[in-house]
Image: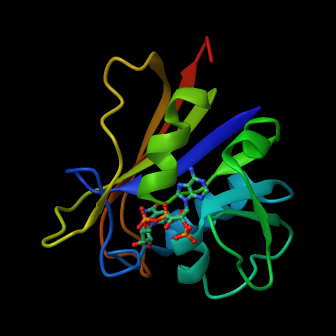
């Protein structure tokens, strides 16, 4: 089964200039807690944006070319796997109809000049299972809301 995890702003923005548009340590910890020990499936541009391999997780990249230092898989191969779809924009759009759950963090800001967005999930069959408001800690720029959505029929 595939799940999806994303952090977006109030307008659905997820990226700017090939990177995350915020520094949000508490959300990175949340990402780590959820994905630890699992397969991570991502687009090539998100792979390029990572500082390196994330410990304790297997990395798989979608690309139409060759990518150094990581296993490249196809969309069809990914659909047969268990793990987390971790972005970015192209890959979220591609897999949204195929995931059974979604962890979405809403970062309480509106990024100017964002260039990558998470799709609107309205009407896609997701049901809000849990929602938790968290105030910005010392290493966060913004307050955030952790949401868990589930979908019964994939
Ligand atoms: N806020 C968040 O939670 C979050 C999470 C992840 C990423 N991001 C941000 O999102 C941005 C990157 O997103 P993006 O949409 O530009 O790129 P992306 O989705 O990470 O990667 C796009 C690439 O994936 C490959 N690809 C796409 N569809 C494919 C298919 N059907 N089969 C095989 N390969 C396929 C292609 O690679 P090739 O060009 O190599 O063929 C394509 O260029 C960055 O700013 C990043 O920081 C944010």
Front-lying residue, 122 or 140: 122
Classify 151 as above or below 25. Answer: above
In the image, is 101 to the left or to the right of 84?
left
Camera-nearest residue between 46 and 101: 46
Instruction: Please determine whether, in this image, residue 154 is positioned above or below residue 79.
Output: above
Q: Is residue 56 left or right of residue 140?
A: right
Q: Residue at x 73, y 58 (%)?
A: 40
Q: Residue furthest top?
A: 153
Tell me which residue sits at (27%, 50%) in the image: 12
Give me the residue at 77% from left, 31% from top: 1
Compared with 144, 139 (above or below) is below
Residue 118 percent location from the top left of the image: 36, 49
Q: Residue 68: name its quadrant.
A: bottom right
* Most distant residue in the left direction: 112
Could you tell me residue 19's position as x and y percent?
Answer: 41, 79
Q: Is residue 91 left or right of residue 33?
A: left
Q: Residue at x 45, y 15 (%)?
A: 125
The quarter of the picture where residue 46 lies is: bottom right
What is the quadrant of the C terminus in the image?
Answer: top right
Q: Quadrant of residue 15?
A: bottom left
């Amino acid at each position: 089964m595939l799940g999806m995890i994303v952090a977006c702003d109030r307008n659905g923005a997820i990226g700017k200039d090939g990177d995350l548009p915020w520094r949000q340590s508490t959300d990175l910890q949340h990402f780590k807690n959820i994905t630890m020990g699992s397969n991570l499936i991502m687009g090539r541009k998100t792979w390029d944006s990572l500082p390196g391999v994330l410990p304790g997780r297997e990395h798989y990249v979608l690309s139409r070319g060759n990518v150094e230092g990581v296993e490249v898989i196809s969309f069809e191969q990914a659909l047969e796997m268990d793990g987390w779809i971790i972005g970015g924009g192209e890959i979220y759009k591609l897999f949204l109809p195929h995931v059974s759950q979604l962890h979405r963090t809403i970062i309480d800001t509106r990024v100017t000049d964002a260039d990558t967005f998470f799709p609107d999930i309205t009407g896609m069959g997701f049901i809000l299972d849990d929602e938790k408001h968290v105030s910005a800690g010392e290493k966060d720029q913004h307050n955030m809301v952790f949401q868990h959505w589930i979908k019964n029929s994939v």
